[in-house]
Amino acid sequence: MITWLRRNLFRTWWDSIMTVVFGYVGLWVIWTVIEFVFVTGRWEIIQVNLKLLLVGRFPDELMWLVGASLTALAFWVAAVAGGSKIDLNNVQTIPHRLFDYTRRFGLIVALAALLIFLAADIAALLLAFQVLGGVVAGRLVGLARRNLSVLGAIPSIIWHPMLASPAIALVLVTLMESTLEEWGGFLINFYMAIISIVLCFPLGVLLALGRRSSFPIIRLVTTTYIELIRGAPLFVLLLLAGVALEFFIPPSIAPDAIFRGVTVFTLFTAAYLAEIVRGGLQSIPKGQTEAGKALGLSTTKITYLITMPQALRNVIPAQIGQFISLFKDTTLAGAALNILDVLNVGTAITKQQDFLGQGLIYEALAFVALLFWVGSYVMSRESQRLEKRLGVGVR
Amino acid sequence: MSSEVFKDATRMSGGRASDEAIVAMEGVYKRFKDFEALKNINFQVGKQEVVVVIGPSGSGKSTLIRCINRLEEHDDGRIIVDGTELTTDVRNIQEIRKETGMVFQSFNLFPHLTVLANIALAPRQVRGMPKSEAEALARELLERVKIPEQADKFPAQLSGGQQQRVAIARSLAMKPKVMLFDEPTSALDPEMINEVLDAIKQLAQEGMTMVVVTHEMGFAKEVADRVVFMADGEIVEVGTPSEIFDNPKEERTQKFLAQIL
């Protein structure tokens, strides 16, 4: 222990000074956070407004829709993950697996537990179990596809839309069944992010292909689009979507703010994704295309079966990074389009009669940050895992 | 290889069109900007014939066989493969690529697919073969190149020699009428060259029509029906292995052989 300290922290005078200074700063930060969380922080504001923060004024009689759509989403993700044909070769022991699961999902389970504790409501617990049920069911369906030849025979192009459609349908119904005045909270950020991610992915891939097309017109159009979108600040685009549509479409039939937000996020992220995917395609050696050609595969099949899968795998970290930043940028929609998203709710609740002028903005913002941090952390962890899983055949 | 085929093949040299020919090139030119890579190439490959193309680097050997399956587009002349002429028509190109297999110097296996999937891909996607049938075919071909136990591995987990044998099996899966080898052993460690050459020899013995670009002179002597010597984008000399190696007529051939042997 002493030798370890000497070797790693106090090897030279300079090291010793750094250790003392940074050690002090570090301890001070940790202490301040702990003090804030457990001593000085006044979390009643979160507890009282929990429902507002999470789902806004979502009508109680429609809450089942939220549960159903979340469950369908969980089912979809679990089924895709469970059905992946590629498996890491090492056999894992049960403690190893438990450790792995804790590392992957511990944080999200802890957050769920915290929320249930704060809500102190049996409905919240039931919702959690419902979502968990979705995960388990999805995993079983995924495994069944991998192991039963009847299910395995269904081509991916039918199977994946089949898995995704209940989730997408329920999310859309949830969005449509409620009006904007009732909507709000973190759920809006979450759903805007999910829908935009699902939509921008194919669009981004198409744009990337367009930019490499052999037709000059397609190349010109996609390049112009990508460069225009990437040249504009997201916030400005969101503001534009808020006001500019009225010039073209009468306000009575203009889509409401959430759809405008989703549209902007989709178009914006697709442009960035296109450049990421293009980079991935450029990293694939020419020999891959030549081998495909020599076998008699058509250009479309070479792209779809050979270059694109490899390109997408190569750029997973950058893709997920883009999705994470989209997820967090949904808070901008709140400011630009007057959507009652979690950030708007968070600042609004500090102006309530009971909490006004007590400086509770810290607590509100800390809670909002926590929600986003857990989401982003899980995405980033899973992306690393995905990369490892798909990297089995890496040269 | 029967001696009959041997004789038949040796009769065919440059220029004359023949019904027997699987590949025929007439007056083919290929230019890269100002550089003439191929000049007036007249060349034929008969059924079940093994043609080995030799020559110094930059002499156009690879360009020659890459023109046969349109990985390079020729600028002048005609190329006819199995009765179909290579034109800009995409359908013709696809048709010809189905009938020609190619093995590359750098293997070019698909790293994201297992060995089995690498081989089964083209029969399934191009010939529309059912998955089970394509995989059975793939296993049979792996047996033929003597690595059946590697079926479920990924290319990166194999040695260079094994990868190249998978690449051969992958080409054979399309049941091509002619196989093109573009320096198949040049990227291999010395101890792996023979396993690949053996696989190619075995193919030759089974009567596969082949064009092989190689620096392995021993292999050329042993397997070739005809040897083509190229230099500066031209075919300098064509003959049986003994004619080329023991009794070369052209000065450039003599010089080249003196350098390498």
Image (spheres, coloured by chain):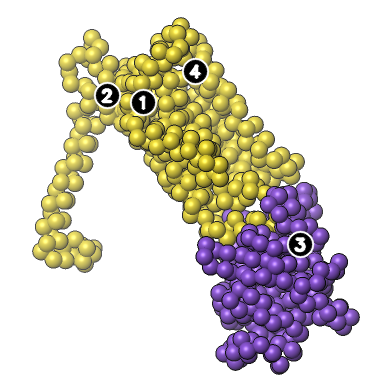
Q: Earlier in the sequence, mark 1 or mark 2?
A: 1
Q: Chain of mark 2?
A: A
What's the distance in space between the residues labelled 1 and 2, CA to CA?
A: 27 Å
What's the distance in space between the residues labelled 2 and 3, CA to CA?
A: 76 Å
- Which of pointers 1 and 4 indicates the residue nearer the eye? 1
* Secondary element type, mark 1: helix
The residue that disc 3 covers is B80
What's the distance in space between the residues labelled 3 and 1, CA to CA?
A: 57 Å
Please give the name of the residue rendered at 66% of the width and 59% of the height, measured from the top-left corner. Answer: B70
The residue that disc 2 covers is A364
Q: Chain of mark 1?
A: A
Q: Earlier in the sequence, mark 1 or mark 4?
A: 4
> Can you give x and y, in whole percent of width and height, for residue B118 in the image?
66, 58
> Can you give x and y, in whole percent of width and height, for residue B5 in the image?
86, 78
Please give the name of the residue rendered at 52% of the width and 55% of the height, measured from the top-left corner. Answer: A284
Report which colour depicts chain A.
yellow
